[in-house]
Amino acid sequence: MAPSTPSAKVSEILQSVPPEAREQFIEKYLLSMLDRTPKEQSKKVLSSAARMKARYATMPTLDLKGKQREMTNVLEELTRDSKRAFLKERSNRDELLEEAVETIVGWLSDIWQTVYEFKANYAHAHTCLLWVAEMMAEILNTPVASGCKCAVLNMPVTIPINRLNGKTVKTFSIIGLLSVDHAILWIWRELFVSMFAANKKAKKLVPQMLADIEEKMGWSALERILTGGLMRVSPFASAFGSTSHNCPARSADPDDMIYGDLFADSCLEEDEDSDDKCNCALHAAHWSDKIDQQRVPLREAVETHLVEKFKVAPSEELYHAIIALSGDPDEAESDLLLVLDEVAGSTPDTLVAAINIHADLDDAATIVNLLDSHGFLLRGRDYPHLQAAVSTLTRHPKHLARGLAIIEQEMNDTMNAVRAATLGTFTRIDDRVQREELGAILKLRTGSQVRKDRVERWVSGVTGPGGTPHPVALAAMLMGLPFGPGPDDGTNLDAMDFVDLDPSEDEELRPHLKERFEGWQTLASSTKGGQTMLLRLYTKMVDLMPFFRAQDVVDEMINYIMDRPSKAHVCDALEQLSNFCKMQRKRLNLRQEKRRRVEESKQASQSSHPDSAPTPTPASAFGPFTFSIPLMSSSISAASPAPPPPPLTGCVSGMEDVD
């Protein structure tokens, strides 16, 4: 509704212009009008201005620039101290950390007084809180000479929140700088409820502030704001997962609680007329009734922001968080599923989110439709999510065949990826001469010295000899200078040995071939018809990579490359596939042994009951009568067939080496 009075129109205009223009307008027009007003009315205005000045005279000054300069000096000293400790083994890190933390956390009480008691400087206080969160992250990431961050993670921190009169409202006693965000988010909640209680103009700043918090601390910080910074109960359920309709009994300070039900569902909406005041995490003991009612518009603002976030970057955790904090969970779930259907095929990440959510809902039909229409978007690293979806398919008889087909396809792809990674080092595995040599090795007795020697020579042979030396490397060698391997040299040197990588980054550069194959193998083993598929895959694997027929050959290959950092994932994958082949060989042996015993029992039963299987009577000098002549070392009759020959130990169907 458009403003009708002149004052309302002028106020709306002043809010839309820059601060400089606003001040100029006030000085030029409003202040001059005050001089022309009646004396009595001007005295009232002057008296009100004097009272306002007296009220804000004691308001804390949030000197952000001064704090920034102070923290810059402390952080620089921390960096210099790390270098000194590395050279001289002496460090003042603990004292410097205490100074840095005290500089920051001692400021939080002033920020709270500004936004809650004086209800002013909301935007500036918000900027200060963002800076505090940034500084905490920077202190945590400050390099340490020893690499140990126990001093930071175990530092006791006490953060008192005091009123202007000195009375303590709350005291945070936490361990480690990682928990300081509890106090920061608690103050942010105080800021927002004060803004909603102040005026409508302040409410317009809330959406942008929520976006700033999400950018700095992630969207999970927004849901923690509603509960005063408390953590969620589990990684798969939001902190708002309580389904109790009765406010549970709480401690004197509900903010000290981390586990269990954080609040009752009834507290998500406006309070009904009740004399009992709820003590759940959505409330604070020092809030007035007016402030307490502002938790509802704050929740709605957070929910709106998270829904917009879900439209851009959906995830399973965000999906459950929105439903749990919504006032109408059923309607929220329906709306989110509609959004998910629209964006599922946009990117690989949105498809993964859609698969995870529908797998959690046990919606096999929708999962099949998603895989049919957008399955090409899935990446190799998305195997855990695809495995969860396929597990859902295998629980439905209608989609069991589709699930088995996906499992077989993924295991074949993983097997081919392992083969490609292996060929990067053992380049001559597929040579005809090397395959013939491997076949001859498999016929040798396991554990013999001759076999060990030939296995070592075979592994060295499939890697290929080193290439011709590079001219520059040859010149360096003649001059006595150190040199690295040439581009064509097949040496044991690994280029990754010369690269200084962060351990976390090093792990991200490796394809998780072992985990991928192991996950699909476990899923196939627990699925009806999966064991037959695994045997079929084993036969294909030993035909494609014959070295998996012998455990000692694979072990020698692993030993050959285990010292190379860039081949760690190949070693893990070879070991996993070797264990898989070993297990399948045992299963095949057990199956053959069982079949042999069944045949022997059939033959024994036939020999003990000749009437059931009549045989032609041979002519003899004794007429139509036959005689059974007992043997000296056995009770088998002369008419019983000879026992089957022992199984061959040669290279037949990959059954040679069974440990």
Image (spheres, rainbow, N blue to C red):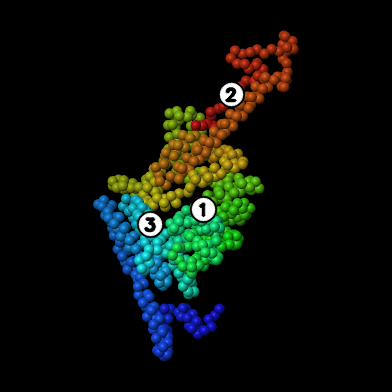
Residue named by callout 3? 173
Identify the image quadrant of the N terminus: bottom right
Question: Foreground mark, 2 or 1?
Answer: 1
**Residue 540, position as x, y percentages in the image:** 56, 40
The amino acid marked with disc number 2 is Pro
Question: Foreground mark, 2 or 3?
Answer: 3
- Residue appearing at x 48%, y 72% in the figure: 204
Tag 2, which secondary structure? loop
In the foreground, 435 or 512: 512
Lateral position of residue 585 relative to residue 37, left or right: right
Identify whether 450 is placed above or below 345.
above
Residue named by callout 1? 236
Question: Foreground mark, 1 or 3?
Answer: 3
**Residue 83, position as x, y percentages in the image:** 28, 55
- Residue appearing at x 63%, y 47% in the figure: 396
Mark found first going from the N terminus, 2 or 1: 1
In the foreground, 424 or 582: 582
Identify whether 441 is placed above or below 373.
above
How far apart are labels 2 and 1 at the CA level? Answer: 58 Å
Residue named by callout 2? 645
